[in-house]
Amino acid sequence: MAMPQRDNNIEQIHRLEGLIAYAEEQKDWDEVERLKEQLRRLLERV
């Protein structure tokens, strides 16, 4: 995997983790599940 692509994937993972934490704070459980699914798909690609 090329370095810029790897860096982009890491950045996306961190962004999704932050969004999940925020959604949990707001008790938006539907959004938490949607973001976790997005994270799962991203991690399957890497």
Image (cartoon, helix red, strand yellow):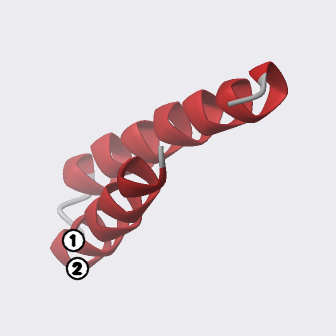
Q: How crowded is mark 2: few (under 14 residues within 10 Å), some or many (20 or more)?
A: few
Q: Is residue 23 left or right of residue 2?
A: left
Q: Is residue 38 left or right of residue 34?
A: right
What is the spatial separation of the Cα atoms under label 2 and label 1, in whole angstroms?
A: 5 Å
Q: In this view, does 33 lie to the left or right of 7?
A: left
Q: Residues within 10 Å of mark 1 (few under 14, many from 20)?
A: some
Mark 1 secondary-structure assignment: helix
Mark 1 sits on what residue? Answer: 33
Mark 2 secondary-structure assignment: helix
Q: Give the amino acid at mark 2.
A: Asp
- The percent coordinates of residue 22 (x first, y second) are 36, 46
Q: Residue at x 57, y 28 (%)?
A: 10
Mark 2 sits on what residue? Answer: 30
Cβ atoms at labels 2 and 1 below 8 Å apart: yes
| Mark 2 vs mark 1: in front | 1
- The percent coordinates of residue 35 (x first, y second) are 36, 64
Tag shown at residue 22: none
Q: In this view, does 34 lie to the left or right of 15?
A: left
User: 7 or 1, which is in the foreground?
Assistant: 1
Q: Residue at x 70, y 24 (%)?
A: 7
Q: Give the amino acid at mark 1.
A: Glu
- The percent coordinates of residue 14 (x first, y second) are 49, 31
Seen in the picture, residue 21 relative to 26 is either above or below; the reply is: above
Query: In the figure, residue 2 lies in which quadrant?
Result: top right
Seen in the picture, residue 15 relative to 26 is either above or below; the reply is: above
Seen in the picture, residue 7 relative to 34 is either above or below; the reply is: above
Query: In the figure, residue 6 lies in which quadrant?
Result: top right
Residue furthest to the right: 4
User: 12 or 3, which is in the foreground?
Assistant: 3
